[in-house]
Amino acid sequence: SSFFPTLRSCSIIKTRSDYVVDLNATNFDSVLKETPATYVIVEFFAHWCPACRNYKPQYEKVAKLFNGANAVHPGIILMTRVDCANKINRKLCVKFHILHYPILLWGAPSKFVGGHWNGKKEKSEIISIEDGKTAQRLLKWINTRLTSSYDLEDEKFENDECLQSNVSDPGQISRAIYDVEEATNVAFDIILEHEMINSDTRATFIKFMQIMVAHNPSRRCRKGSADILVNFDNIYPSNILSENIDEQTNINGLDAALHTFQICGKQVPRGEDTRGFSCGLWVLLHSVSVRVDDKGSHLAFTTTCDFIHKFFICEECSQHFYDMCSSVVAPFNTTRDFVLWLWATHNNVNEKLMKTESSLRTGDPKFPKIIWPPEQLCPSCYAVGSQTKNNVINWDHNEVFKFLVSYYGPMLVSRYKDIDSVIMDTKSGSEDLLSSRNAVTVPVGAAMVIAVASCLFGAVAYAWRSQQKNRKYFLQTLLFYIMLRWEDCI
Ligand SMILES: Cc1cc2nc3c(=O)[nH]c(=O)nc-3n(C[C@H](O)[C@H](O)[C@H](O)COP(=O)(O)OP(=O)(O)OC[C@H]3O[C@@H](n4cnc5c(N)ncnc54)[C@H](O)[C@@H]3O)c2cc1C
């Protein structure tokens, strides 16, 4: 049980007092109407977005010059932010055409009141700040715009509380399936809220959902994903994908879809009990990687890459991940190759973030980024000659693979059972794992079999309906249908 320490949320990090003004759908217009400032900057962000979290101190540094009681240049620029991951701000963010995070918009406050932004630069009174990635660059952009010469005055961002880190803390550990369920749920929510399914992304979405039906370690998410696949044509009839449809109709259609489907059941999200979206997403991806079979490993890899590229709206993360995907030249032939690639890729990101977090001091001291797994967790992963202090690690890849398969396989599922046996399914963890192993992806017709427990009649009827709508899946449907054990149906 020491593997699973107390709960924490990876999105909660101690920071200094805020200078940035938080806006939301209810105060947005009134604050901007009343501000005496000549200009406003609105940062549209999502609290789960790691790049936004790392950007926060940069933005705060500039805000300190202009906002608050001790501002050096008060009344010129009001620096604000809107959390688009907060449901109440959804329509506001749609109005401003927010397609990735973070986005900084600039203009006179009155132009934002009751306003829109169409994402285009020409002739707009609201403009996007393209180069504000650091405090210096943001201030340089402002200075160019206003022909001013504001300076950060060499202020240092200090946060001594965040300095201490216990690198030996083995708490960098998956918080079991709650995280996976939340990540699955949040990913789905984001896709719908941001209207991300279109003719370019549709195939990736379907493939990812097929993988979810086959390999999500949570039985509830598998069922929910199956339900969505089965009803996909109803959620996204072709007119919703049409570009000509007016915005309001589009939003209404998605609202209806949002209320109909709960991809991982009613108790998700649980809020406080989970570690945050991006952690959960990693855990989900690792869990999938150990569950696909050799034949399915390459398809799972390409689907994962496409999914992150198209649907993970932390722009920096998705681009970095996609670059690493693109560097893979030969197709994966084995589960082992895919599992180890994902593990190494995650460690690449960890290594990059170790540097960023230590220079910006934005790390969570209780859960510092480390090269994973630490030796305490998997001594046999460290071959002779490793010098952990100097980060020279001689990995024993066979041992790493064994460890990952066990950790993201039975260990994760059994932990799930321990945590909450009341709301979970009654089938055992290992059975759950087995039942999610065989197929590469699940065709729509088979998804239906999992989703609807009405078995034979319903399955045949649906397979027939699928054939009418989408011939591509029909053969797969029949094959998978034969493979399915009858007990999965009841
Ligand atoms: C696909 C993807 C790409 C990302 N790219 C970026 C980026 O470019 N820049 C950025 O700022 N943030 C990025 N992030 C977010 C970042 O990686 C973390 O998710 C976030 O900072 C929260 O970190 P965490 O400490 O909670 O643990 P996370 O790194 O989220 O890890 C979750 C859990 O996975 C386990 N784990 C850790 N390392 C490994 C490993 N190598 N193999 C297997 N399991 C492991 C541990 O148990 C850990 O607690 C990305 C996230 C995802 C899902």
Image: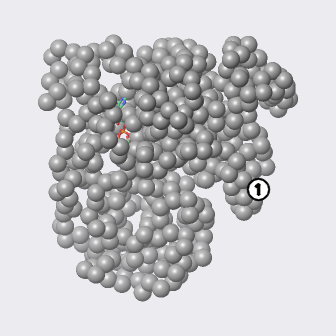
Q: Considering the image in quadrants, where does the N terminus appear?
A: top left
Residue behind mark 1: 244
Ligand 1 is found in the corner quadrant, namely top left
Give the image location of residue 154, x and y in percent.
Answer: 18, 67
Any part of residue 308 in sight:
no
Residue 466 visible: yes
* 158 up-or-down from 113: above or below: above
Residue at the image point whose x is 38% and y is 34% from the top: 174
In the rendered view, tell whether residue 95 sits above or below residue 378: below
Mark 1, Cα crowd under 10 Å, few <14 / some 14-19 / many 20+, is few
- Residue 297 relative to residue 444: left or right: left
- In this image, 292 relative to 201: left or right? left
- Element type at marker 1? loop
**Residue at point 82% right, 27% down?**
458
Depth check: 467 or 419 in front?
Answer: 419
Q: Is residue 393 above or below residue 60?
A: above
Which quadrant holds residue 134?
bottom left
Q: Position of residue 71 (x, y in %)?
A: 27, 79
Residue at 51% over, 53% down: 100
Task: Please identify the quadrant where the C terminus is shown.
Answer: top right
Looking at the image, which is closer to me, 183 or 355? 183
Residue situated in front as seen by the camera: 68 or 410: 410
Residue 194: percent from left, percent from top: 60, 53
Most distant residue in the front direction? 422
Could you tell me residue 183's position as x and y percent? 50, 41
Q: Amino acid at mark 1?
A: Asn
Which residue occupies 43% across, 55% down?
Answer: 47
Quadrant assignment, res 228: top right
